[in-house]
Amino acid sequence: MTFVYFYVELNELTMKNFLSTILLLFLIQLANAQSHVAKSEYARYNCRFAPKGWNNAEGKLMCPACAKENEDARKKKIADDKAADEAAKIRNAKLKAENEANFKKKQAEIAAKNKVTEVYVTMGKTPVKESKKPEAPVKKAPVKIGKDVQLYAGWGMGMFNHNNQTNYFLNENKDTVLKSNDWVETYAVWRENKENFPKNIGIVLLRETNKLSRGNEQNVADIIDLKGKRHFNDNTISTIFHLADDYFVVCKSPTFKEWYSYGNNYRGYENVEIYNLKTKKSIKFDKDDGLYISISIYVGGRKIPEEPDLIPYLSRKYSNYDEDVYCLDSSRNMVVKRIPKANR
């Protein structure tokens, strides 16, 4: 019985302490709220203790107590940020000093390890020899051009890419035999003459330009002889490159500028023909249904099915994806093979 009585008294005491704590917190909150303007006539103030729906009205003033608390919080944040910044500066300065000390220590260790003992050696006097007078340079006589000269320059098919920036031709002895400031690029034999580039001629891209539509200009291409004389004298020719033997591809762009692509594949020309320099005969490409003719060159690897003796050199594709392949047969005559889209 005594135990039950003690237990009841203990519970009553605990409950009283709990209620006292709640009452104290309420009084503190109430005292704090009393300094705020939670309610006033016409609800003129915005206050965090105001009833729901009273705040955020236009034209209201900020509660003075709320304003003070906001200002105190702002100043505290500034002070805390400043203190954190100062602490960071001190920490960084300490790290910097430690790193510098470690670096100097490491450098000193490396210097001590690599230190070399210097040895001085006294040499006897060396007799002075009489200096020879420099020999006068031998002047080369101008190279005379013979009747049959193989010209060397950029790769004969190279004008397809316009990637050569030389304005001269060499002979087999690497002597300059033709040079002109009127030329931007030169093409002939490059390394070995595998495709039988003809003697006594070269391909040039001139500085002279042809005026096109829309204010565009394009450099003129031509074949020249050993005296620099132009073969075609046609300013609409924009590109010439060698296929094989006496066959050259002549591309003309009289109105619109040729467009470029990548590698050995596809550039657009208004007119294209295969020209035989020896016979002066041409194989002209028809226009298909577009403004431009698309072509690409072969540098080896492809074979014509069931005709192993044909060597393909040039491809022309049509808008329906059919293809003409220009080949040389075993007698070195030009043969054109039509390959339909279905058989490609």
Image (spheres, helix red, strand yellow):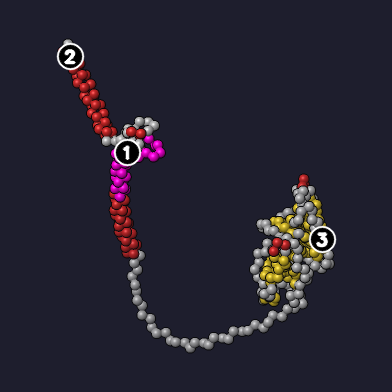
Task: Give the residue drawn at x 68%, y 67%.
Answer: 154
Residue 291: % across, % down: 76, 56
Q: Nearer the viewer, residue 232 or 203?
A: 232
Question: Reading the chain from its start, which is encountered first: label 3 or label 1?
Answer: 1
Q: Is residue 164 above or below residue 337?
A: below
Which residue bears the numbered disc 1?
Answer: 63
Under circle 1, the secondary element is loop
Residues 308 and 186: in front is 186
Q: Which of the two labelled residues, at mark 3 and mark 2, occupies the earlier sequence position?
A: 2
Residue 61: horizontal and vertical position, in percent?
35, 40
Q: Residue furthest left?
A: 2
Whether label 2 touches label 1, CB < 8 Å: no
| Element type at mark 2 | helix
Residues shaded magenta: 55-82
State which tag comes first along the sequence, 2 or 1. Answer: 2
Report the residue marked by disc 2.
5
Q: Secondary structure at mark 3?
A: strand
- The kind of residue on which mark 1 rests is Cys
**Disc 2 residue type?**
Tyr
Measured Cα–Cα span from mark 3 to mark 2: 126 Å
Tell me: residue 35, above or below residue 256. Answer: above
Nearer the observer: mark 3 or 2; the answer is 2
Asked if 337 appears above or below 145 in the picture, the reply is above
Residue drawn at x 21%, y 19% as measured from the top left = 11
Would residue 56 be seen by someone viewing this image from the given angle? Answer: yes
Closer to the eye: label 3 or 1: 1
Q: In the shown orientation, is residue 28 left or right of residue 47?
A: left
Q: Rate crowding at label 2 as few (under 14), some (14 to 19) or many (20 or more) other CA atoms within 10 Å.
A: few
Q: What's the mark number on residue 283?
A: 3
Outermost residue toward the front in this view: 41
